[in-house]
Every structure is written in C-alpha cells, then in structure tokens.
Image: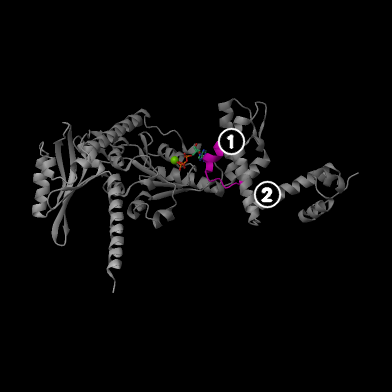
Amino acid sequence: MKNDKEIIEELKQENKALEWENQLLKTIMDCIHEGVFVTNANGEIILYNRVVEKTEGMKREEVLGRREEDVYSFSSEYFFHETVTNKVRKTGKSVVEQHYEYSLPDGRKTSILFSTFPFYYKGQISAVYTVGRNVNQIGEFIAKTLEMQKKLFREENNQSHRAKYLLEDIIGISEKICEAVLLARKVATHKSPVLIIGETGTGKELFAHGIHNASLYAKGPFVPINCAAIPETLLESVLFGTVKGAFTGAVDIPGLFEQAEGGTIFLDEINSMPFPVQAKLLRVLQDKVIRRIGSTMEIPVNCKIVSATNVDPFRIENEKIIRPDLFFRLATVAINIPPLRERKEDIKVLCANFIKKYNREFGLFVEGISDALIELFEKYHWPGNVRELENIIESGMNCVDGDKKTLKLDHIPVYFRNRIRKLMEQHLEAGYSGELHKTLADYEKKFIEQALKKNQGNISKTADDLGIWRQNLHYRIKKFGIEVRETP
Ligand SMILES: Nc1ncnc2c1ncn2[C@@H]1O[C@H](COP(=O)(O)OP(=O)(O)OP(=O)(O)O)[C@@H](O)[C@H]1O
Ligand SMILES: [Mg+2]
C-alpha cells in the first residue's frame, strides 16, 4: 500500500508530465501556418495561437479566459461565433472548409477559410476548435504563382521555341553512343513518346533538341520545361493552362501542351513530377486531349512528348518515383545514354571538339592534348560526365599561354588534379590492383626506362638520378621486367 506521501509525489510527477506535454503542444501551435482558436464548453476562449493573434490584431492575454461574445461583441464577428461555434456546440456537427469575411477591431477587412469541430471528452462536447487559413495570404500566394506563370509564358515565347542542337552535334565514336544516336534518329520519326535516361551531364538535353530537329515536328515549336524547377502547385497550370475564374486571380492562359502544338514538349526531370500531376499527364497520354484548369472544353494534343530523367529505371520502379502506368507510356521508347566512364573511347574526340570550341572563343591555337593527360582522363570516373569534361577543358584552356600547342596536366585546375590524386590514393590504400594501380605502375616503369636510357643503362647513375638506392632500383627493374642494356 502506498502512503499519502508517495501518492502526493506520484501526482506531482504526473502533473509535471502533463505540464510538459501542454507546453510542447502550445509551442507547436505557434509555429504552424494555420490559425487555431479553441473555446471550452462555456464558450470561453482557451487557446488562441500566434496566427490568430496576427490575423485579428489582438493579443492572447486580452482574450484568453474571456467569453467569445464579450471579445467579439464590437462588430459582426459575433455573427461567426453565434452561427458557427455555437452551432457546432449545439449540434455536435463539424463545419468544414467555409469561407468567412469580417472586419477587425482596427477596421481592416480579413477573410478566412476555416473548419470548426466539436471536441468530445467522455461523451460530452467539452470544447469547440476552429482551424483556419488567412485567405489574403492564400490570395497573395496565388497572385505570385500567376505572375510566375505569366513570366514563364513570356519567356517561353521570347525564346521563340527553337531547339538549338542537331543529332549531328552529338560527339562520340563509341559503339554505345553511336547506337543511342541511331535509335534517336529512328524514333524521331515516330509519334510515340520518348524517354531519355542518363546521368547528369551525359547530354540528355542535347538528345532532346536533336530528336525534335530530326522529327516530323521539327517545324513546330520546341517547348522545354524542367519539372523540378516549378513549384508543385504551379506545375499543373503551367502544363495545362487555366481559364479565367478557375481560382481567385486565374486568367485565360494556354498551357505548355497547347504552346507545343505541332512541335515537341520536353519534360525534363520527369522524376520530380508530383503524383497528382502524373495522374493528369497519364490521362493526356491516354486520351490525347487536355483540359485547361477550370474548363470542361477538351483541346486535342498534337505534339511529340520527349521526357528525360537522371534516375535509373530500376530505382524509378523500385521506389515508385514515377507511377508504373505512366512510366510504361512515357518510355514507349527509352534511350539510354551511358555514362562517360563506360565509353572512354569518346574522351579523346570530345576533348578535340572542346579544344576547337575554346580555341575559337579564346583566340588560341591549341592543337591537342598530351598523352599523359588523356591517359589520366581515361582512368577518371567522371561523375559529372561530359559536362565535367567540358568544364575541365575550359578551365585548362584559360591557363594555356597563347603560343602553346598542347594542353597538359599543368594547365588543369588544381582541384581536379587533387581529386584524381585522392582517388588514386584511395585505391592504393585499399590494396586495389586494378586499372589505376596499373596506370601508376606504367608511369613508374616508363620513368625508370627513360632514366636508364639517359644514363646509358648505368645503374648507379640512374639510381642517383632518380634519388633512390641502387637496391631499390634493382628491385623495381626486376618487378617491372625492365631490360637493362648498357650502352657505351
Ligand atoms: N556527346 C556530346 N557531344 C558534345 N557535347 C556534349 C555531349 N554530351 C553532352 N555534351 C555537352 O555537355 C553539357 C551537358 O549536356 P546536357 O545539358 O545535355 O546534359 P544533361 O544530361 O541534360 O544533364 P543534366 O541531367 O544535368 O540536366 C552540354 O554543354 C552539352 O552540350
Ligand atoms: Mg538536362
């Protein structure tokens, strides 16, 4: 049996826990975007969060504990409490998603979108709570969104919807890239949607331009949209357009599907498209018609749909990033652009192409790239693919003197050299005996052979030259199988 002292102690602990929980809930109430207003069974205000303070321009100290009719008796607000909170208290039924306009003590007008609910405790209504949003703020949000939509529309028009690149601009001699270009050329002439899959910087946009220009739609506009760059709430109206009155501030504006009429719509980063928009896009692909938001009129869709993603299809499927039914339709034809590390044969020709480009831009006369640098490039894993290669060449070309004909390792930015060095060290530390290790060994072998040649095969002189012990040189000669020939 517990004695009185123990019971009191236990109650104290319970009170502390309740106080803590109460404090936590109040703190959370003050950081949400909705206004929360609660009255108890007697109609006294017991919770009045920060958003309501801001909306109504009153402090909670002024209102807490007072009956709502006393607080709001100054104006028509009483009407709200009379008709809404009292109704909910009397009927026990919620009032959901209502719009209500009223004036504040300082004369400002405000309007809220709210829901009011009864709170039952032990079978009785012990409180009524209202959760609402300030419509003025929602209005501001919609206005901002529309402004952006109009800006986008103008920008898109100004770009005159031209695709800059041709499939011929895609540089590469590897079997993989040639196959991808061949497939792109073939599917360009079909009406089916095309999905381009490739890591960042592999040339997805280049392919999209190329496909458009090689397609039956080449004379029409090329309308790109990056699904990741548009806020979720806006994407739908940008794609499908709106009609006046669809929502506060909505105007008659065509969506990108309409703007792409007779041309190509390029849905870049399709993996970032929110699910509700994916559902609408699926319907467009099935029915070949769109409806502007707020309209029932069906507008036929007549454009090629090219989309791109840098997320590999296994992840898309496993993590359900794109709805399977939509993915299946978008990827009627899928073009895989392999990463640069899987087509090393392309590095040399890409380098030559970028050198030509930056010779023209910087007024240089560089003819090529040193073998050592190419070898290094071929060992690197290129996480940023062709874009990264182009950036490296561009930085290198910035450091080449006007009279130099070869781009060398010294011209390459330090951060890149360090990155490669680190990579090599990591592989060596891990006891890696693969390609990178072999490259280093090859370098070393060549270096020793050259030193031996210079010193006519004299071991002592060569060791001196290399700054290593004779025994060490012997060991390396044996290890690399170097043939030593003393020349007179
Ligand atoms: N095969 C190629 N030949 C010539 N230039 C290329 C090739 N592939 C990519 N590039 C160039 O590399 C850069 C990146 O290409 P692009 O923007 O098409 O890549 P992306 O796959 O769309 O990348 P992200 O996923 O980051 O958007 C561009 O400057 C592009 O011109
Ligand atoms: Mg891109």
Q: Quadrant of the N terminus?
A: bottom left
- Disc 2 is placed on an element classified as helix
Residue linked to disc 1: 393
| Residue 120 position within the rendered picture, expressed as x and y whole percent measured from the top left | 16, 58
Side (left or right) of 431 relative to 259:
right
Q: Earlier in the sequence, mark 2 or mark 1?
A: 1
Side (left or right) of 160 relative to 247:
right
What is the quadrant of residue 488 in the picture?
Answer: top right
Q: Camera-side residue: 92 or 69? A: 69
| Residue 80 position within the rendered picture, expressed as x and y whole percent measured from the top left | 11, 43
Q: Which residues are magenta?
A: 378-392
The Cα atoms of the two marked residues, 2 and 1, are separated by 22 Å
Q: Tell me which amino acid carries mark 1.
A: Ile
Q: Which residue is depicted at the point 59% across and 29% down?
A: 359
Q: Is residue 282 visible?
A: no
| Mark drawn on residue 451 | none
| Residue 89 position within the rendered picture, expressed as x and y whole percent measured from the top left | 11, 52
Q: Is residue 50 visible?
A: yes
Query: What crowding class fits label 2: few (fewer than 14 Cα within 10 Å), some (14-19), or many (20 or more)?
Result: some
Please determine whether, in this image, residue 219 is positioned above or below residue 440: above
